Image: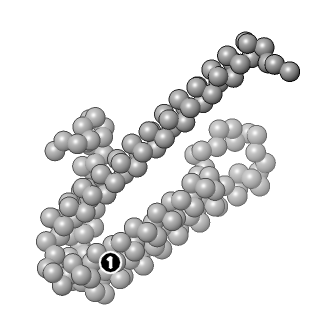
Amino acid sequence: MTWPVFYKRRTMKNLILSAMLLFTVTVSAKAQGDRINEIETYKIAYLTEKLGLSAEEAKIFWPIYNDYQKEQAALRKERFQKMISFRKINEIEDLSDAQVQELITNDFSIRQRELNLEKKYYYKLRSNLPIKTVGKYYRAQEAFKREILSRYRNGRPGRN
């Protein structure tokens, strides 16, 4: 049995469109990954400059910082996978009261875990480094966030 010509063309067209879509999604994901890596690289350079760590302090700081980043990423991934953010729900009216309550309490739970994680690493930093160095770190973190937000709002991701 042979397939009609129009069906073959339509199938080929669908295959080409699917391949183009896959390529676009792949390029977009790579660009997003590149942007995240670029920001993280810039952040490390930024923190290095702002903290002015001695060699001994750097040996202590960077492993703690890296562990904190890993745990933070895992928590963000969990939040995304569960889609528990209250703001992501389109129609609250379509949910039962129990579902709405669960969304809200799940969001509280994740935010509490984020706060607990921040405290955990604050205590690790504080117990291993001078408190003024820890203070510089928190100040640099906030300044970095403001700078990155400003750069991307102004459409200048790669400029100073």
Say above or below: 113 vs 57.
above
- Which residue corresponds to mark 1? 63
Q: Quadrant of residue 78?
A: bottom right
Residue at the (46%, 70%) spot, across then down: 71
Mark 1 residue crowding within 10 angstroms, few (<14) / some (14–19) / many (20+): few
Q: Quadrant of residue 54?
A: bottom left
Task: Please tell me whether mark 1 sits on a helix, a strand or a loop.
Answer: helix
Residue at the (63%, 56%) spot, across then down: 82
| Residue 133 placement (x, y as % from top left) | 20, 76
| Residue 102 placement (x, y as % from top left) | 70, 58
Task: Mark yes or no: residue 104 visible.
Answer: no
| Residue 19 placement (x, y as % from top left) | 56, 32
Q: Is residue 14 left or right of residue 44?
A: right
Residue at the (36%, 72%) spot, across then down: 66
Between residue 159 and residue 37, name the one nearer to us.
37
| Residue 17 placement (x, y as % from top left) | 58, 25
Q: Is residue 102 left or right of residue 140?
A: right
Between residue 123 and residue 37, name the one nearer to us.
37
Say above or below: 73 vs 131.
above
Between residue 59 and residue 147, name the one nearer to us.
59
Say above or below: 44 vs 29.
below
Q: Quadrant of the C terminus?
A: top left
Q: Please, what is the three-letter code of the amino acid marked with disc 1?
A: Pro
